[in-house]
Image (cartoon, rainbow, N blue to C red):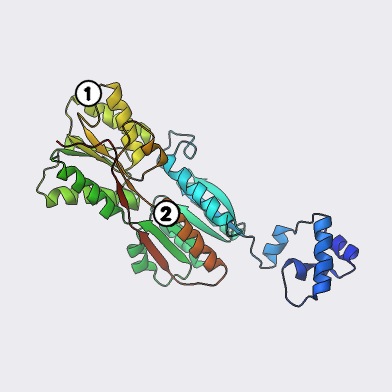
Amino acid sequence: MKSEEIAKIAGVSRSTVSRVINNYSNVPEDTKKKVLEVISKYNYQPNTSARVLAGKQNDTIGLFIVSIADTDNPNRLYNNNYFTQFVDAAVECANARGFYVLVNIIYCENDYNKVSEIFLQKRIDGGIVIGTEREADVLINVSKRGFPVALIDYDAEEIKRNKSDNNNLIVIGSNDYEGAAQAVEYLISLGHKDIGLLAGRLSTYSGRQRYEAFFDTLKKHGLEVDKDFILHGDFIKSKTADEVKKMIQKGKFPSAIFSSNDDMAITAMDLFKENNIKVPEDISIIGFDNIPLSSLIRPALSTVSTPVYDIVDKAVTELIANIKRNKKGFFSYSYDTKMILRETCSRK
């Protein structure tokens, strides 16, 4: 059914139907009521494309997940405990505010063109981006065209220094450096001196922050770093498994490991178990992110909790405020992390 037919049944003009749909105030209440009754009776749905061409919102947020590195895994979102939390939180937070979420996965660098296309086609009113910083300029240029963009896991200070005049850019994250430093301090307080690292991907802001905090904290305490204990898992389970297997084959272990995320820590724990290396009796391990699985495995994983829901909720709130023109200007916010002590760390 078209708007012309609704107008004919209601006995009004097509422009009156349009004004009712778009909630204009200059429509008499009795006319508005009559049109809405017809719309309800015939289950009429306004044409979204027409609304967009008319300059109206389509009440949709794009969620772009950058997953370029894990090229060997075709199920990058389905098997990723970290990203699925963001998707669930984004859908819940946006729906609660009357917005839909369009989820897109960036599999390769050419896919960044998709991001620009989706914005320029006005299929979404704004977007949230989670992932590597490599192509940040592409996203910043999109925001310069007037489209609100929220970046999660990006260096807010660097972007602010270079792009402070951008009125459509939002950067939300967590204080990962402090959280990682606290985790390493905890291992040191237990008497550990030979501490290893499962490093995350250094093309991500969080990966770099956790990496730098590890080395800075050991240096602060005058502890040496054994290069054989620095394993580059890059937040990828298969790569983590390869790195841990190599360490096991060498037969040389640290007394404790700080893992830059929980997925890598759990992957390492599985391999330790297969090789009769006991956690925490033989080796202590602490993760980062506090994914749901970390409390369910045995022994339960000690970790650093990032407030994923709060981060996403803030991103959605600020994005919608920008979309509705209630709030303009560069905005950034960072949440504190929290240590969650469970069963995988013991005294040396």
Q: Position of residue 329 (x, y in %)?
A: 45, 72
Locate the N terminus and report the quarter of the image it occupies. bottom right
Residue occupying image coordinates x 64% and y 64%: 57
Q: Is residue 275 visible?
A: yes
Vertical placement of residue 98 versus 30, above or below: above
Percent coordinates x, y for residue 101 in the rendering: 57, 52
Image point 27% across, 54% down: which residue? 177
Amino acid type of the residue tagged 1 in the rendering: Gln
Please rate how many residues cluster around mark 2, counting C-alpha atoms within 10 Å: few if below 14, some from 14 to 19, many from 20.
few
Residue at the disc numbered 1: 249
Q: Which residue is mark 2?
A: 135
Give the x, y percent position of residue 253.
18, 30
Tell me: 263 left or right of 194: right
Residue depicted at 83% across the width and 56% down the height: 41
- In the picture, which quadrant includes the C terminus? top left
Query: Seen in the image, is 232 located left or right of residue 250?
Result: right
Q: Which quadrant holds residue 137?
A: bottom left
Give left or right: position of 36 versus 56. right
Q: Nearer the viewer, mark 1 or mark 2?
A: 1
Above or below: residue 106 compared with residue 265 = below
Marker disc for residue 51: none
Image location (x, y in percent) of residue 307? 39, 52
Q: Residue furthest front?
A: 342
